[in-house]
Structures are given as structure tokens and as C-alpha cells.
Amino acid sequence: MSARIPVTVLTGFLGAGKTTLLRSLLTQSNGRRIAVIVNEFGDAGFDGGLIEDCGDAACAPDDIVELTNGCICCTVADDFIPTMEKLLNRDRPLDAIVIETSGLALPQPLLKAFAWPAVKTRATADGVVTVVDALALSENRIPLDDDATKAKRDATHDDPVEEVFEDQLACADLVVLSKSDLVSPDQLDALEAKLASRLRPNVRIIRSHGTLAPSVLIGLDSAAEDDLASRVGHHPEGEEHDHDDFDSIVVTPQPADTLDAMRSRVDAALGLDGVLRVKGHGRVAGKPAPVVVQAVGTRIDLAFARPDAARADHLVVIGLKGFDTDAARRALAGA
């Protein structure tokens, strides 16, 4: 049997910095053939376009597959398996595959799919890399409690954000603490200690400002599909799950008058109860290039894309189920 292609599962909650890390990995690929599967929550893609626009030959569109039919952990048979078969059947063998999951995906159902006959002899889950937003942890937007506090919280109510985060940590072979330049060294030390108490033995934590060498992320050789029993988080192995706790909308607003006006619109949407993430492409009146919008928590990043970037002008808003979608649309319209 020929060597199986290593597959890195890149997971992490909404806005953790997965796409930034992936772009960095591809631009340092040094000729290795790396295919990418990008999964989005909701009906519109965005991250795949960011990767294609990275300006490197390794970011070729043919090597990037975008799945926008819901979280990949819920569409294994319909989306993941057929996509993997197409990649594995290429005439020129791949050196590696990276799967960037939706920020709301649970990794374990995806790992189980590596046992499917179409995949198991040809690919292996080389490692699960969980990207954790250090700023979000420091601002308590993602709970990271000690055991006693967590038990008390679980007894009083379910927190869907915490549940997803817990499952992503439980599956990790490597934790990347992103945006570590935005948090003080003392805070980082404290966060790492708390994270370590939540992780399986021998799982490393490394800090990142958005870039890491490919050798750090590829070649973990964990065969994660073979030890699912040790990777059980909030959802026990085999338990069915859905994403009814979250929702998303796609908004196509009129151009903003200025970049500052667009920032104010996005800030107003982020300030609504239950809104977790805003991302996509918008327009500023009179400017030929679209604006790339990346917003989560208190952080809003706006940057003009290349003028020739053929991207749909829409913004995706992701939030807890029941967030005020009409108010989000009004906010992004500047109303």
C-alpha cells in the first residue's frame, strides 16, 4: 500500500485566525503540492477567496475547494467524502491536504470519516490543529473556566459557544494561540496554564502572530482517526448534533460613503446581542477595489483588496440563534 496523504484539520472558533494561518502556510510551501478544503457556515463563501488572493502560486484556485453547504461535520457523506475522492484521484499526487473547518464545526465527526473505505487507505488525519484566539479568551468572549467554575456553569445553563470550543480543544494535537501580540505576557502565561488543564496529555501550545512554518503544522503524524476515544469533548463519540444554536445571514449593503462609515456600520452590527462575527466584502463609494471586512468581538479589520479581485460584494453575519437579523441588516446598511 502506498503512503497515505497527510491531512491537517485546521479548526478553531469563529474569528480565531485560521485563514490567516493557512495563507501563511501556503506561501511557505516551497513547491509542495498542498490542496485546501475550506468550509463555511452559511450560504456564502469568503475564506476561499482570501486564500486564492494570497498572491502565491501555491494558492492556485484549482487546489482550493470551498464548501458552503453547512458545517462539514454535518455533511460528511454529501460534501467531504466526494471532495476527498476528487483530490485523491488527481493525476499528480498531492503532498498534503489541509481542511479549514467552519468556526462552528466539531472535529470528531470529520475524523470518523477517515475510516470510510474511499479514504482510509489513501489519507490519514495527520493532526488536528486548533487555533485559539488569545484576545477572545482574555476578554472572556470564549469561556475558559477552571473545573469548579465550569461545573457550576454547566449545571445552570448550556453555553453553545463553550460547547463548540470544548470539542475543538478535545480533538487537538496542537493548539495555536493566535493574536498573542495583542495580549500581555502575563495574561498569555495564565491563559496557557488554563488551556493546558483542558487538553489531552502531550498536546503542545504555541503562540502565533499569524504565521508559522509549515513544518510546525504538517507532519504531526498523529493518525487522529485511530484514537477517537481520547478526543471526547462535550458531545460523546457518536452522539448526533446540529447547529440549531447558531444562525447566519448574507447582506449586500449599498456602498458606504467612507471607510470610517463602513467601520461604523460593522461596529453597530457587532454590538447587537448575539452577533459573533461579520466578514465578507463591502464597497466604499468611488473606490475601485472592494473592502475586505474581518470583524469579531471588539476587533474590526478593514483592508482594500486588489481592484481586480472578482469577489461578490456581500457580508456574512454569524450569531447565536435568534439574533435580530433585521437590526443587523439595518446596521450594515447604515440606517
Image: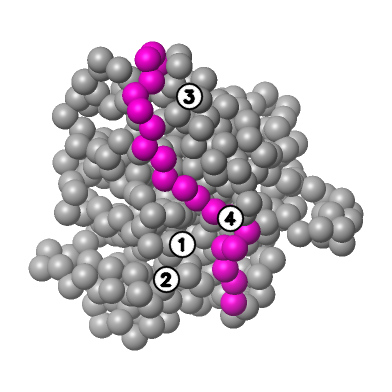
Do the CB atoms of the residues marked 2 and 3 lie less than 8 Å apart? no
Across and down, in percent, residue 134 comes to 62, 36
Where does label 4 land, which residue? 246
Give the residue at x 63% y 31%: 271
Q: Is residue 18 left or right of residue 285?
A: right
Where does label 3 land, which residue? 334
Q: Is residue 243 magenta?
A: yes
Picture layout, residue 172 above or below residue 16: below
Marks 1 and 2, how far apart at CA: 7 Å
Of the two numbered discs 4 and 2 on the same chain, state the one appearing first in sequence. 2
Marks 2 and 3, how far apart at CA: 36 Å
Q: Is residue 332 visible?
A: yes
Mark 4 secondary-structure assignment: strand
Where does label 1 land, which residue? 71
Nearer the viewer's eye, disc 2 or disc 3? 3
Disc 1 marks a residue whose amino acid type is Cys
What crowding class fits label 1: few (fewer than 14 Cα within 10 Å), some (14-19), or many (20 or more)?
Answer: many
Where does label 2 land, which residue? 75
Do the CB atoms of the residues marked 1 and 2 lie less than 8 Å apart? yes
Q: Is residue 325 magenta?
A: no
Marks 3 and 1, how far apart at CA: 30 Å
Give the residue at x 56% y 75%: 227
Q: Decide which of 260, 93 is in the foreground and name it.
A: 260
Q: What secondary structure is the magenta-colored segment mainly?
A: loop
Disc 3 marks a residue whose amino acid type is Gly
